[in-house]
Image (spheres, grey):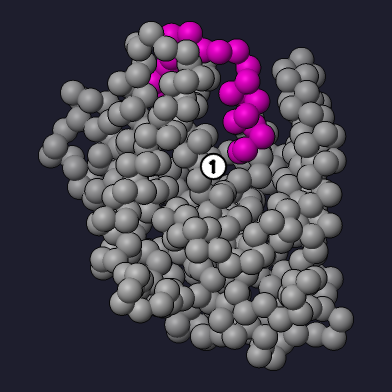
Amino acid sequence: MPEETLPESEEASRGVESSTVATEGDTLQSDTQPSSPRFHELDALRAVAMLLGIVLHAFLFLIPDAWPIQHPNPPGEIYWNALNVIHGFRMPVFFLLSGFFTAMLWERRGLRQLALHRAKRVALPLALCCVTVIPVNMWAYIGGDFEISSWLFYWLYGFHHLWFLWILLWLCAAFLVLARLGVQFSHPVLWWLLVPLVAAPQLLMHDFIVGPDTSDGLVSHPLVVGYYACFFFFGAFFYRRRFTMRRWWSLALLPAVLLAFPAALLLLYASVEAAWLGTLSGVFQVFYTWLMCFGLIGLFRLIASRERYWVRYVSDSSYWLYLWHLPLIVFAQRLVLTWPMNAHLKFSLICITVTALLLVSYQLGVRYTPIGTMLNGKRERPGHAPLVARE
């Protein structure tokens, strides 16, 4: 989405081969297709990053003290470990891809159109969600204590799961200012410094988790914004330098999962007894995040570089699914909490049911409506016109 598909989509990548900023030796293209006008693999990866948020929120009630709703018999450490695995890379990947597509839109359409696009795809949906999704989410959380008179004001206490749209708006604003000042985001050395620079905010984080803290308030925490800014602007640099995305990058997933993540998690546990080990854990967390970013780009280059209708459909729907999934998940968690059913089955049932309901609502009430046009661009019903790229 969003991610995104989320606010910026493959629509921006039309005609990318005609760009004038490519430098000799730097090419942004498939290693199997010399000139790809759309980045289907990146669109799919961004959608997966968003959909993993549904999975993550669905199992949080199975982790002790991690969620307002608590399962009476949590099933051990498996979901705590899964939370760390997903949280350590999901939003960094999203912001990296957001920066990538932001630079693409700027190059293809100019600053004014980029600003209008972000207003339409990010600012407007967030504003509408402040008076729809967030109040419903509060109702799901607090039930009978919900005050209808506060319906229009609950967003002032936090953006809930939509915090990333708020931070994305600030990063896009910073991008617009820097681009207006003449920054090209293509220096061959300077922007690489963002890779180690991520360690600075990471080492100052306070949450006991692999990955960054979460800041969902109206005033975002500077450390969190700085952390995601590194990925966002590296994504812009990544596009501007036309680096070749290689399938073999997927090999980075092996050291990420087998070395960096276990080390980060074990050292995080050990930091309870020796605080300096938390610093070492933070270093491994940064390694894990970057390895996952590059590894997943390589993996999706390998498995999702060709256009497939169903992948594009899921990518389109992922924005709507992410916007509305949380209140439905909270209602579902309350419903199944006391059912005499295995906890793993409850989690699976919640994921399947909520996703199915939102997909149906997307098809029947969003995809071909003004809401769908706002989120993803205009779509024509089959039989009326061919599927077109987002506006």
At label 1, the amino acid type is Leu
Write down the region rendered in magenta.
68-87
| Residue 195 visible in the displayed image | no
To which quarter of the image does residue 35 belong?
bottom right
318 within the magenta span: no
Task: Provide the secondary structure element on which disc 1 rests.
Answer: helix
Horizontally, is 200 left or right of 51 in the view?
Answer: right
For image coordinates 78% across by 19% down, the residue present is 270
Left-right relation of 363 to 388: left
Front one among 277 and 91: 91
**Residue 78 within the magenta-colored segment of the rendering:** yes
**Camera-nearest residue between 194 and 276:** 194
Left or right of 276? Residue 228 is left
Report the number of discs. Answer: 1
Does residue 390 appear in this view? yes
The quadrant of the image that shows the C terminus is bottom left
In the displayed structure, 384 sits above or below 357; it is below
Among the 4 quarters of the image, the one containing residue 144: top left
178 shown above or below 50:
below
* Residue under the image location 57 percent in, 49 percent down: 49
Q: Residue 285 in the image: x percent, y percent? A: 75, 39
Which residue matches tag 1?
52
Residue 174 position in % (x across, y down): 55, 69
